[in-house]
Amino acid sequence: MPVDPNRDDSDFIAFFAARTRTLELGFTKPLLQREPTTGEFSFEILLQQNTTPAGPFELLFVSPDDVTVNGGVIEVHFSTPADRMFYKLRGAE
């Protein structure tokens, strides 16, 4: 389906941003945010890890070299210090 450059998606985007607050993923602020002065969108995600599912989870640090963008897909490449790791994906706080 071709994209209509004249279509106004602001209602859908506002709905999506409001819905992301209610996801049971630990998000404390909207996952997708729009800067009102520039109209640009951004999102921030925390990636945490631990060797047990009970936690406590610690931040998984990645560098810009660990991140690639392939079309619309954002890929994060990393290695783990243990054979078994558990991960938690959260909205930035």
Image (cartoon, rainbow, N blue to C red):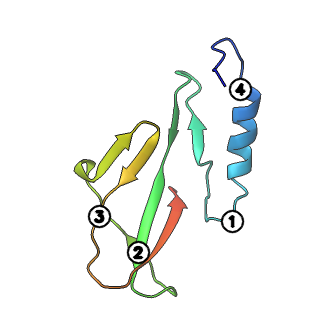
Residue 79 picture location, percent across and down: 27, 69
The amino acid pointed to by label 4 is Ser
Q: Which label is found at residue 78?
A: 3
Of pointers 1 and 2, the one earlier in the residue sequence = 1
**Residues packed near mark 4 inside 10 Å, few (<14), some (14 to 19) or many (20 plus):** few
The answer to which image quadrant residue 51 occupies is bottom left
Residue named by callout 1: 24
Of pointers 4 and 3, the one earlier in the residue sequence = 4
Residue named by callout 4: 10
Residue 8 picture location, percent across and down: 72, 19
Left or right of residue 70, residue 34 in this image: right
The amino acid pointed to by label 3 is Phe
**Residues packed near mark 1 inside 10 Å, few (<14), some (14 to 19) or many (20 plus):** few
The amino acid pointed to by label 1 is Glu
Q: Are marks 1 and 2 in contact (CB under 8 Å)?
A: no
**Residues packed near mark 3 inside 10 Å, few (<14), some (14 to 19) or many (20 plus):** few
C-alpha separation, residue under disc 3 versus residue under disc 2? 12 Å
